[in-house]
Image (cartoon, rainbow, N blue to C red):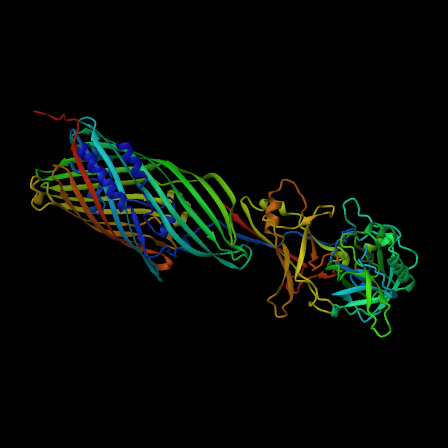
Amino acid sequence: MLGVLLLISVGMYGQNTISPYSIFGIGEINYRGEGRNMGMGNSGIGLRSEVSLNSLNPASLTTIGQKSFGIDLGIDMKYSQLENRYKSVNFLNGNLSWLQIAFPINSILSMGFSIHPKSNVGYTISTIKYLEGTTTSYPVNYTGTGGLSEISNTIGLKLWKHLSVGVTSSVSWGQMNRVETDNPQISGVTSIDQTDKINYSGFSFKPGFQFYHKLSKKIDFTLGGIAEFYTPMNSTVQEVISKVTTSSSGTISDVTEKGSPLHLPPLFGVGTSLGFNGKTILAFDYTRCDWRNGSIGLSPEKLVLDNTYHLGLEFSPKYDAFIMKQAIKYRLGASYESGYLNFNGLTISGYSMSLGLSVPLRKEKSSINISLEAGQYGRTENQLIKETYAKLNLSFNLWEWWFIPQRYE
Amino acid sequence: MIRIISCFLFLLLFASLMSCKFSDSTEYKIGEQFVKSTSGVVMIDTMKNELSTVLVDSFQTSSTTRLLIGSIKDSYSGTLKSTPYFELTVGTYNVTDEKIEYDSIVFKMKYDGYYIGDTTKLSELNLYWLNKNMKLNAESYLSNLAKFEMKEEPFGKIKFYPTPHNQKVFYTRLDDVMGRDLFKRMLSKTDTLSNTTLFQEVFKGIAIVPTGNSPSSLTGISMDSVSTAPSIRVYFHKVLNTTEETTKTYYELPFNTSGIHFMNYERNFSNSLLKDFQNGTVELPRSKMGELTIAQSLTSVFAKVYIPGIRGIPGFAPKVSFISATLYLFPVADDLTGYRNLPDTLNIYTADHMNRIAGQLSTTSGSYVYATKYSSTDLDKTPYYAVDLTSFFDTKIGETSVTNQTLFFEPKASKMYSTMQTVVLGSSLSYNKPCRLQIYCYINHN
């Protein structure tokens, strides 16, 4: 049943961006985190919770209680405004963000599966080209669509009462379509269209750990760490070139061949959190990804070291898990990304602020999480593009007892 | 568990409804500096091509819709004498007991309006009966080289100044001896005039042979219908009382529309630009003709363009896709008429390496391809011809072996093989070649 649901959900990923930055590599890479993380500035490497799944660190999966079964589903609604120095355009879209299930195997081992859009591609770029060997220019349009999906398996193992480890193994796959439309102003020829259908596939492996300890009766401390390694993203490219004339259109070339693999650099992250009285949690993450060691079809000087910082706060003013009004949790967060793209000395960086809310459902552990993130990415200098966005996320964190037989009297 | 799955299905449905997008613009036309394209359109105009002038020795001249009479001297192609051959058939006349008397016999022709040359010069023609009946060749046509034996003496001589503009009928009086003979046969109801077969046993056909040593002009004679085509008329009148008016009438031997007709062209290239054709050569590279190339209808002189590298286009680069090809031809102005008499279009034929014409160039959909005359954007509006050879290139690139890779150009005349038009190709002012081949390819350097 769940397998069928996963397959259905695979088909639900649609175009989720119109950012020209999505032309690079595998496109605009999606953040991997759940509703709680999004409300806390996308922090989570050092977070643990019995009532929330946290895919940012696989070691956190050991928090699942015995005989629990959890499902987490997130939906995004994102409003974007893209602008450069001359114009701007607005974009609104909604999409499934993740789907995740988790369950315990035994008292020390837990397992989870998830699926989510790994990246999105969606852009339309108009520019000019020159007829090779001449000074004659002609207009060219580039359109990109598609993206990658990722399905993951996570295993968490409690090694010691203060230490858990885990690993997430993921398979990524998907198709990106890039259409180049040349209008070379040749008599009788409307356009020359090159359609590249690029199918990518690859694996990633993300180990993580979490060390947790009560510093005092009221203060809980957690330290986490992750690393994510990628195998080369291999690709096959179907390149179809067609000629559109004033009277007909036809394929003049159709070639399928192996494409250049993409090399995504490893990502390393550490995170910590402090819990106070079980009511307030303060979390901080740092990740580092050296894109200079990667290869995504861009010249090396355009790739730089990417540092991200995430800060989050969760609090419940008068926490009582059995009184709904008092079990509501409020979240606040901020994040900053130094960026991995560099054009003419200008790095494409971004920052965001977030607010969140967790409303418990009637079941003891189930909840609805709402978060609102507002941020900015990019810049308008040097003909670059700035994206200002507001993203509303709604996630459903559902828990059920598992392997408990019904009793009838 | 059932409850949670039901809830989950509902959420999935909700999520699918959320999977939508809205944008106030379908295109966000910025970000060109992000594009690292390694492909694009390339224009190549340095592809090798060779021009020459080709003489096709023999070509069909039978079944044309015009007869050309006379001879002409052309500075490009020398002298051309046109001798039309055709057949007459029997006419109809019911001879009664009335008394009739012979008046005269005439040869009737009608101008169709076409001419070339100097019509102020006297044209001289002799009319001959043939000694033998004409026969088509094995391919059921007669060519410009065909000849049939004539009687030694002409049965009529025509001296006239052509007035083709008026497109009128003109008559030439013939020898009355022949006229009275025909009149006598008519009166006696001889078998000769009873049907075409018996008629042609005696009157086997006519040839109109230009005479005189000074070629003047070629004039078009109408063949549009029996009534306008050449014929012989025997005029007579009824003998009536002196108080009554004489009523003249005639017996006509009309043109045999179901018979054979063709034109023999006697060409002499001496003292012309194409003088080397006189010694048996059939192809002259432009280097031997002062960098000129000639295409002339009627004489079957073609401008030949040979493009040896078509099948090599896919080898220009690792990933090349052919887009289009256009050929430009640049005519030179005539000393007397400038560009005024240039034809609007040129016929194009494909030919093999032996200069054997395979057929008229056509697109894949079967429509003929022509070179069309345009005016350049230069101040002097110099004309040029352009032809889209994309379909031809597409075909040749896809072929596994070289076939018919040569193109022959010839002025498109309203009446093929009976209208002379000339195009001399030379170097344009802006492009120092008589021919420019412009090829567009899409090259992907990935």
Locate residue A176, reporting x and y percent.
39, 44
Instruction: State whether residue A370 appears in this view.
Output: yes
Q: Nearer the viewer, residue A46 or B21?
A: B21
Give the left or right position of residue A277, taking residue B116 as reference.
left
Is B378 situated left or right of A308 in this image? right
Expressed as whole percent of the image width and height from the top left, the position of residue B396 reads 62, 45
Quadrant of the rendered image containing residue B254: bottom right
Name the quadrant containing residue B93.
bottom right
Tell me where residue B24 appears, x and y as whole percent: 32, 57
Q: Is residue A365 above or below residue A299?
A: above
Locate the C terminus of chain A by quadrant: top left
**Residue A202 x/y as whole percent:** 37, 36
Residue B97 lies in what quarter of the image? bottom right
Residue placed most toward the observer, B426 or B300: B300
Identity of the residue furthest to the bottom in this view: B243
Residue at (45, 44) in percent of width and height: A196
Observer-nearest residue: A359 or B69? Answer: B69
Which image quarter holds the N terminus of chain A?
Answer: top left
- Number of numbered discs overlaid on the protein picture: 0
B378 to A284, vertically: above or below: below
Query: Can the viewer see residue B71?
Result: no
Question: Could you say which is closer to the camera, residue A185 or residue A333?
Answer: A185
Instruction: Give the left or right position of residue B71, taking residue B41 as reference.
Output: right
